[in-house]
Amino acid sequence: MHFAFTDEQAMIAETAKAFFAENATSERTRAAMAADGIDRALWQAFTGELGLAGVALPEGHGGVGLGMVEFAILAEQAGSQVAALPLLASLGLAAPAILAGGTDTQKNWLPMLAAGEASASFAILDNGTLIAPHGAVADIFVVSTGDSAAIVRRDTPGLTVTPLMSMDQTRPYARIDIGDALIEPLADPRAAISAALSTGWLAIAADALGGAQACLDRTVAYALERVQFGRTIGSFQAVKHRLADMMVMVEQARSAVYWAACAIDEGSDEAAFAIHAAKAFACDTYRHCAGEMIQLHGGIGFTWEHDAHLHFKRARSDASLLGTPDWHREQIAQLAGLDEAA
Amino acid sequence: MRLGFSPEEEAFRAEAAAWLKTELEGSFADVHGLTSLTDAPDRRRDWEKRLGEAGWSCVGWPSAYGGRDATLAQQVIFAEEYARAGAPPRLNHIGVELAGPTILAFGTEEQKARFLPAIARGEEIWCQGYSEPNAGSDLANVRTRAWREGGDWLIEGQKVWTSLAQFSDWIFVIARTEEGSKGPKGLSFLLVPVDQPGVTVRPIHQITGEAEFNETFFDAARTPAANILGEPGHGWAVAMALLGFERGVSTLAQQMGFRNELNAVIAAARANGEARNPLIRQRIAQAEIGLKLMRYGALRMLSDAEGGTLGTSALTYKIQWATWRRDLGELAMDVIGLSGETVEGHDYAFPMLPNLFLYSRADTIYGGTNEIQRNIIAERALGLPREPRGDLK
């Protein structure tokens, strides 16, 4: 038992942090928001020169052969900059689905996804409509309807992809209408969906952790510089106690995310519990911290110009996507045995 | 990053579990499952001694001082097995978890040899003399004085909220040893025997009806000059380091106690149908998550400490568990409803869940209130400025 990063993991974290801080700037993210929600140069650099995009994919499929801890590290650091990338859609949802349930031929997509030569998305059935994060820029979709799942290519005749104006423009949705388009069924849909959900939930939780930490850091920095009543506002307990509460939540979210990542990697009995806990807790934390970021910045925090709303909207999207915190807590209630006889 | 334990560590777990089972089903069956700190004090002393004899009292300490040289993973395992076995809360938890580690860190070789084995063998029980009537959250506002007279320190003053002083042999006291000094300067950390004419212990009744803590009066109390930890006038650093030890391995044993309390809430909810109430289900799930995050937070904190760098995340631990437990007390009462309001008989002594509701109100106060914890987190972890001090006396 050693619940701290190894030297290699610490190095990946440091590399990823520096990479996203330097490249996923507010200016570049905003340019992507005004277009189709992807910073293509960033995606190329991430999948190309950084060489870590396939961190959790096996080496035989173009990956690095590490695990969920390393993948969570990347998602956390991308989240801290609200990076406009199809990281969740392509590598957090579609790739694990194909890896776990695809045919051998379908697995040929994996090296291309890891190298950024293609990108994928995962269509979610919501009130009878299929919607896909970063769907407008995907080359293929993993589509699941009930017990079956399949790959549909973007260029298949009959498929319609309609970009939707999305509250979070760093991860915009598209509506997918399959019509009579040719679908390519996955070999093991159940395994595919299960892998997509657990990796996706973890990736969202890690994104939320990174975002929440960034909200805390940036709000602390502001509280140290903003002067009112002749003092920095960070010296008022009304402000500093709220920042302390944010940290208490962020540290728990950090434990949750890396507990879940380890539990998946180690095949622990606790994995399902841990993933639901991470998704629920980290998303609540991000929502809280992003809301506090706006409040503690005052008027400036409500402007389009300030980055607070990027976090606020990403936090909402993280919470809404693939089960709200309440839904994940209900799964935990079941796992905790509340339905067993007294 | 790895959460699992090795086969050697699992073998250690089996050994610890077997020993605990034998004792708690055999000669110590009467202390099995006790939860209150004040029940059966004589047998609790016997239990401390039994743990000591078998080398299970202070497993993380060096064997030279009565410990077992256990690795971090072994300490974690023992703490878990201790609680899982239903072993009672340690009568000497202040000695084992606070006084001992502080003496280990700041004591001279003579002090270590004098005090540590006696703690490990369960022969000397300790309590803590920090708070005073005018030194609560503002702990440095200590008025208890001490001065040298011949070969002794003489001590005058009053401490309050001294848990378990009625059972203790020794008390560590922060006292002002430099006349006219203020705040954290001029304080010394003294080790004082309780059983002497100059020390009077008076119990204080709590909102639960129990009397776990006391007022302790020092009226020309004495301790030999050698019984000072650190330099005279520099006791504050020792006192603050001690508070850091509250975030050690013992937190894991404490969490197993919380596990039992949450299990009792779940059992009650299943029994009376509240387990089908969606709002209660959400709160129980949140409590389950919080408890797990306490465990993994503690393991992160301990793993960081093992690497030589205690992260600032450790500072968030106290407010986290205290708030969790207070919320659990509220949840417990919402689950059991009116049945929690009454108890048979004439004693004001409530069973586990209603008692938890009352007792947990202390958790967010002692050891630094939630508000003080927020100041500590904001100032030491986040680098925010202090609120300016007032000047009222």
Image (tube, rainbow, N blue to C red):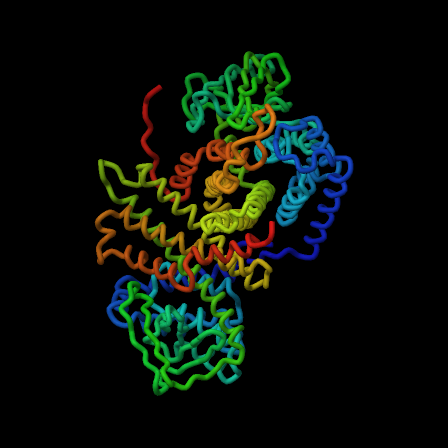
Camera-side residue of A20 and A128? A128
Camera-side residue of B109 and A91? A91
Quadrant where the image shows the N terminus of chain A: bottom right
Instruction: Please count the marks in the image.
Output: 0
- In this picture, residue A304 sits left or right of residue B301: left
Camera-side residue of B310 and B256? B256
Camera-side residue of A261 and B193? A261
Question: Relative to residue B182, is residue B244 depicted above or below?
Answer: below
Question: Relative to residue B126, is residue A52 depicted above or below?
Answer: below
**Residue B176, percent across and down?**
48, 20
- In this picture, residue A156 sits left or right of residue A257: left
**Residue A71, percent across and down?**
47, 65
Question: Relative to residue A4, is residue A264 depicted above or below?
Answer: below
Question: Relative to residue B171, is residue A124 depicted above or below?
Answer: below
**Residue A27, percent across and down?**
26, 64
Please identify the quarter of the rendering in which residue B55 is found.
top right
Q: Residue at x 35, y 19 (%)?
A: B393
**Residue A333, percent across and down?**
51, 54
Task: Examine the rendering and report whether any part of residue B249 can be seen.
Answer: no
Q: Residue at x 60, y 18 (%)?
A: B223
Task: Examine the rendering and report whether any part of residue B194 can be seen.
Answer: yes
- In this picture, residue B89 sits left or right of residue B359: right
Please identify the quarter of the rendering in which residue B388 is found.
top left
